Image (tube, coloured by chain):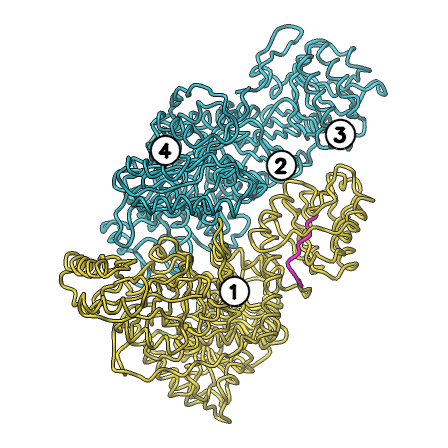
Chain colours: A yellow, B cyan
Amino acid sequence: MNLPQFEVQTHFSKLSRVEAIHRLLHPESIAIIGASANLDKVNGRPLKHLLEKGYRGQILPVNPKYREIKGLACYPDIESLPSGVDIAIVAVPAADVIAVIESLGERGVAAAVVFSSGFGEMGKEGQLLEASLTDAAQRAGVLLCGPNCLGFINAFENVYATFSQYADGDTGAGPVGFVTQSGAFGTAIAALIREQDLGLGYFINTGNEADLVFAELALAVVEDPRITVVAGYLEGLVNGESLVRLAERCLELNKPLVLTKVGRMGAGARAAASHTGSLAVEDAVFDAVISQYGVLRARNEEQMLDMLEALIQPRRCLGTGLGIATQSGGAGVMMADRAEEVGLRVSSISKATQQRLGQFLPSFGAVNNPVDVTGQFVARPELLREAVITLLDDVDIHVGIVWLQLMTAHVDALVSIFEEIQSRTEKPFLVCWVAAPLQARVKLRQLGIAVYGAGERAVEAAAMMARFHANVERYRSSGFVRIEAASPVPESRLTGVVPTEYASAWLARAGIPMSPITLVQNADEAVDAWKTFRQAVVLKIESPDVTHKTEVGGVVLNLDSEEAVRRGASVLLSNVARSFPAARISGILVQPMAEGHIELVVGAKRDPVFGMMIMVGTGGTMIEVMKDVVFRRAPFDTNEGLCMLEQLRMSALLDGVRGQKGIDRSAVASMLSVLSRWAVAMPRLIELDLNPIRVGQSGPIAVDCVMVLDEAS
Amino acid sequence: MNLPQFEVQTHFSKLSRVEAIHRLLHPESIAIIGASANLDKVNGRPLKHLLEKGYRGQILPVNPKYREIKGLACYPDIESLPSGVDIAIVAVPAADVIAVIESLGERGVAAAVVFSSGFGEMGKEGQLLEASLTDAAQRAGVLLCGPNCLGFINAFENVYATFSQYADGDTGAGPVGFVTQSGAFGTAIAALIREQDLGLGYFINTGNEADLVFAELALAVVEDPRITVVAGYLEGLVNGESLVRLAERCLELNKPLVLTKVGRMGAGARAAASHTGSLAVEDAVFDAVISQYGVLRARNEEQMLDMLEALIQPRRCLGTGLGIATQSGGAGVMMADRAEEVGLRVSSISKATQQRLGQFLPSFGAVNNPVDVTGQFVARPELLREAVITLLDDVDIHVGIVWLQLMTAHVDALVSIFEEIQSRTEKPFLVCWVAAPLQARVKLRQLGIAVYGAGERAVEAAAMMARFHANVERYRSSGFVRIEAASPVPESRLTGVVPTEYASAWLARAGIPMSPITLVQNADEAVDAWKTFRQAVVLKIESPDVTHKTEVGGVVLNLDSEEAVRRGASVLLSNVARSFPAARISGILVQPMAEGHIELVVGAKRDPVFGMMIMVGTGGTMIEVMKDVVFRRAPFDTNEGLCMLEQLRMSALLDGVRGQKGIDRSAVASMLSVLSRWAVAMPRLIELDLNPIRVGQSGPIAVDCVMVLDEAS
C-alpha cells in the first residue's frame, strides 16, 4: 500500500495514521475555522448541527469578526486556540487554506476537514494548488479530509462536521456506515437510507482526497463494532491495493461491503497493442477485482438501498435455495425467473414439505415452490403464516420471500403474522409488499424485517445475501491465499514489442505451454525447419511493426510439403509487402500446426489502479466482437482460474458441444495461475496476448504471443 | 383472427361482438346475480362500490333471500328481471354458473362478468366445466368476461363491476387503460397507478378468458378517446393474431401499448429436431413479435409504472438525443452510461449552446452534456432553469432529464422553475428528484411533469418515449406492410423429416440460394459427382434418422481428388456405422465446397401462438451455446430483415473484423424476407434449419437444410 505513512504530530504525542483517523472521527474538541454567525451558511451550518444534535465535546469557533457565536467563545485566530484541539473544520477561501493548515499544525491539531472548493476540480491551476495543499498537510502533520467535501457525520457521538443537507432533519444513528466520493449523490443516498429507516452511523464525504482516501476512511468505519454493513459510492480510484485491503478486512469481520461506482461504460476501447489491452477497460477491471475480493456491487443507488435493507439483518443466508410464497401465481413466476438470472435456485421442496403444505392450502393453490397461497389468505391469514414457516423449514431452502399486495384493511393482522414467522424460524426472509400501506412498511422495519415494494428487487437482495455468505466462506477457507509470485526472469534490455522468439522462450521457461517456433530468414531455412518438425507447419511473419499478423495476410496455415512451404513463404512475404510495405521484417516464424479444436485467448495487462490483471476469453480473432472475457487480479491459484472459466459466457463450449470432446479445465486453470504468478513478478511487463491458445486432448498450447515491455528504469 | 365471431342476441336487437363489448364496458343497467346484503363479501362488494362511487345506471340485485338490499329492489331470480338489462355480474358457485348464463341469455342480457372460480384453474375437471361454459355462453348469445376474475372498472362512467381491493379508496378516472390476466398482480399494479396519481380509466381483469380474451378487451379500451395509454399484464396467450391487431391499432391511434408478461425464462430448451426449434422458446418469440409490432415491453411492474409516468405526457420525443442536467457529476455519468445501454444518445451539444451555457454556469460546472449546474444552484436556482431551457433548445436534443436531490427547503421555488421550463419549451423533459419531499412529487405530477426517484429509471423511461415515437413513424411509413405470401409449393405426401434433396430443391425454387447437391449411393457415383462439380467437394451422410450430421461424423470436407473422394466416402460410412449403427442410410450427398468466411444460421418454426417465425443467428454448430439469434414473425420485408441483422449481438462480424471483408447485408436480408414469404405459405411446415449459411463475396448460400413437415391433413 503506497499511501503516505507519515505520523501526525500533536502537541502531546505522535499519533499513527490509523490513530489519527480514529481521532478525526471521534473528536473531543472541534475548531471551526472561518465560522459564521449565520447558521444557514456553509460555514455556519456545522455549528448549528453540532449544537442541535447535542455534540458533547468542545466547540471552538474561530473568526476575528466575532467575540462569541451562539453563546460560544469565538477565537480571533488559530494561534489563540487552546492547545490540544482534536480537529478543525476549515471553511475559508481556497487561497487561504494552506496557511490555515500550517497554523493548525503549529497548534498541534490532529486533523482538518476542508470544505473549501477551488482545488483539483478547477482545472490545471486548482490541481497545482491541491498538490501544494497535500505537501503542506504532510509537513504540518495534519491529517486532511477533503478539500471540496461536505465533511462527515459520526451519528453515534453526534459529530456533525458537515454542511450536507442530509443533516437537516432526523439523523438517528444505526448500523450502516457510508463513505462517498460525491457530495451531492452521497447526500441523496444518505437521505434514502434515512427514508428507509436503516440507520446511518457514519456519513463521510471524501471530496478531492488530497490526503485521506476512500478506502482508509471506510476501513476506520468498518472497525467500529456498532457498524454491521459498509456502503460506498465511488467515482474514481487511484490506489487499488487499499480497496483490496478494505475488502479483505470486511470479510474478516463478516461485514458486507456494498459499492456503487459510476462510469460503468469506461472510456470505451483505447488504442492498445494487445486485445487484452483494449478489452481491459477501467470498469471491467474494477468489476472483476471487487468480485474477486468479495465486494458486493450495486449498479445504482436503488440497488444499494435494496441490498442494505437485507444485509443489516443479522440472519445469514447459508445457501442459494430460495423459497417463495405468494398470493399471485404470476408474481411467483416473475420472481422465479429473476432468481434463476441472479444465481438463486427456486429449489424443489421435499415430498414431506409438500404434504404438509397440502394439509392446509386450498386445492387450487400450488404446493410446489413458489407456493401460491391464493386469495384465500385474505379470509384466512393463518394460511400464509403456516405456508411460510413450512417452506422455510425445508432443508433445501435458505432464504424466503413472501409476496403480497395492498391488504390495507389487514395491516395489523399481517404484521403479527410476520412477527410470528420471525420468531418461529431462524432463516432469513424478506417481505415484498406491493403498494403496501406506509404503516405496514414502517412496522415491519421496526421488527427488523426487510420489506420491498417489488418482487424482482426482493429477489436481487436475497441473491446478494447468499453471495455475501459465499464470499465469507470462500475467504475463510482460502483467505484469498497470498500466492507467492514466481521469480522474475532476468531483466533484459529489450523494450517495446518483444521479438516473438524471446517472448516465447521466457514464457516456456516460466511453465507456460508454448508451441515451439523457429525464426528463419528464407524459404530454404523454412523448409529445413519443416523437416525438423516432421509435421505440417504454419508460417508467420515476424516484424516489430506487426502485432496482429492475420490482419496483414501474415499467416499461412497447414503446409506439409517442400513445395507448399516454399510457396507459403513467398505468399507470406508478398502479402505483407502489399498490405504493409513499411513494416520491418525480422524473418519468418515456422511452427508446427497445433492440435486442439477449442480456441481461447489469454492475456495480461498492467492496470494503473490494480496492478497486473490476467484475462481469459473465448474466440481467437473474434474476441473483440465476442467480448466473452473474464479478468482476475494477479496472482491467484488454480481454483480461481477454474472460476474464471466458469464465468465465460461460452463456458459450455469447453465441455464439448455437438459431438466435440470437452477439454481439461484444470489444465487451463493451472496455466492461468502460473501465468498470473509470473506476470506479477515481471515489473516491466505492460501487456501480453497469448492468442490463440489451442486446447485439445493434450491440454492448452499457446501458438502466438505479443509481449510489450516498458522502458527499463 | 380465429376468435369466435358469433353475434349476441339481446331482446331488442342483434349486437356485433364489438358492440357487445362496448355495451359490457358502458352498461346502463347491471344485474348482480347472487348479490349479498353483506357488502364486505365478494358478492356484496360490487353493490357497495357501485353505490359509493355513484354509478348512474340501474342496479338490479338478484337473490331469493332478500326483498331489497340497501334500498334497491332485489329480484328473486333471473326470470323476474325486467327485459333489456345490459350486463350481469355472476357471483354464484361454479356448479350454478352455466344455468345462470343460460337464463341470462333467455332474458336477453348482453354480457356477463363471472367472478366464480372453480373452472380451468382447478385441473382437468375444471377445464371440462369451463369448456361447457364457453359453449353455453355462445349458445345463449351472452358475452362472457371471466370466469375466475375480479371483474372490471370503467372509472369514467363509475362502473364498478368488481370485487377488487383496488376499488376501496380513491379511484378517480384518467388516461391509463389497464387490462390484466392476473387478479392479484393486476390489483397491485392498479394500486401503484393510483399511488403515482397517473389516473386509471379502465381496470379489467380477464381471468380465465373462457370467452373474451385480453386483446379484445384492450382493443375496446384503446378506442376510448379519453384513454391515451394502454397497459397490459399477461401470463399466457393463445391467440397471437389478436395481439398483433391490437398493437397495430394502438400505433394507428398514436397511443402507446405497454405490456408486462411473466414467464420470461420460458420452459427452457425443448426437444426439437432443429436448432431453430429448440431456440424458439415461448418468451423469445413473444418478445420478438411485440417488438416487431411496436409494443413496448416492461420487464416488471415498476418499469411499467415508470413508462406510464412518461407516456401519459402529451409531448412526444422525436429522436434519441438525450440532454441531461444535474447537480452531481456522478449522477450525470451514471445516467449517460444507462442511456448508451438503452439506445439513447447523450448528444454533443453545439458550440453555440455551450457558449450560452458558459455565460451563466460557474466555471467548475460542465458545459457539455451532461450539464453539471453544481451545488451553486442551491443559492441561484435560476441556473437550473436557464441551463435546462438552453439545453432543450439545442437542435440535437429531443428529451431532457433534470437530476436533483433533497432540497427540502426549496420545493416551491423548484416547482415554479419546472413550471417555467415547461412553459418555455416544447420538448418533453423528465425530472429525477432523489429523496424528493412528497409534496414536490405531488405538485410536479399535478403540473403534468413526470417525476422519478432514480436516475437510471428516468433514462429508461425516456428511452421508451423515443422508441414509441420511432415505432409510430415506422408504422406510418411502412404500415407493417401486409406482404403477400409466396405461392406454396405443390403439396407432396412427404411428412416428418424431408429428404435433403427434395427440401433443397423446393427452397431453391422458392428463391433461396441453395448450394447444389447430388445424392449418390457409392464411392464411384461420388467421384462422378465430384468430376461434374469441377471443384473441391464435401460429402455428407443422408439419413432420415440423422438431423445433425456433424455429431455422428457424417461430414467430410474439402475433397479434391479421386482418391480423396473415395477415402472420404469410406470414412463417412464407417463413422456413421460406428456412432449410430441403427441409422437408415439413404446415401451420400455430394456438394461443392461453398465459399464464404461468415457462417450464419437461418431457420423457420411454426409457433402455436404467433404462427410462422423466422430466425437468423450467428454461429454454425455453436449456435445453441452462442444464443445470438433474432426472430421475426413471417412474412416481412427486406427492411425488417436488415433490422434483424442489426440486432444480432455479433452484428459487427458481418462488416468484417481483423482484416476480413464485410458481407452484403441486403442480400442476406432479402433472403430472410423471401424465406418468410415462402414459409408462411407452407401450411404443413413445422421446422426448418438452414445451417450453416455461408456468406462471402457472392452473397449467402445455404449448405445444409433440415425440414420437418406435419402430417398431411
Separation of marks 3 and 4 at Cα, in angstroms: 60 Å
**In what element is the residue under mark 1?**
helix
Q: State which mark lies toward you, 3 or 2.
A: 3
Residue drawn 79% across the image and 42% down it: A361
**Mark drawn on residue B518:** 4
Q: Amino acid at mark 4?
A: Thr
Q: State which mark lies toward you, 2 or 1.
A: 1
**Mark drawn on residue B186:** 2
Q: Which residue is mark 1?
A: A643
Separation of marks 1 and 4 at Cα, in angstroms: 48 Å
**In what element is the residue under mark 3?**
loop
Q: Which residue is mark 3?
A: B118
Q: Earlier in the sequence, mark 3 or mark 2?
A: 3
The chain identifier of the residue carrying mark 2 reads B
Figure check: B320 above or below A543: above
Q: State which mark lies toward you, 3 or 4.
A: 4
Q: Earlier in the sequence, mark 3 or mark 4?
A: 3
Separation of marks 1 and 3 at Cα, in angstroms: 50 Å
The chain identifier of the residue carrying mark 1 reads A
Query: Range of the magenta residues?
Result: A317-325
Q: Residues within 10 Å of mark 1 (few under 14, many from 20)?
A: some
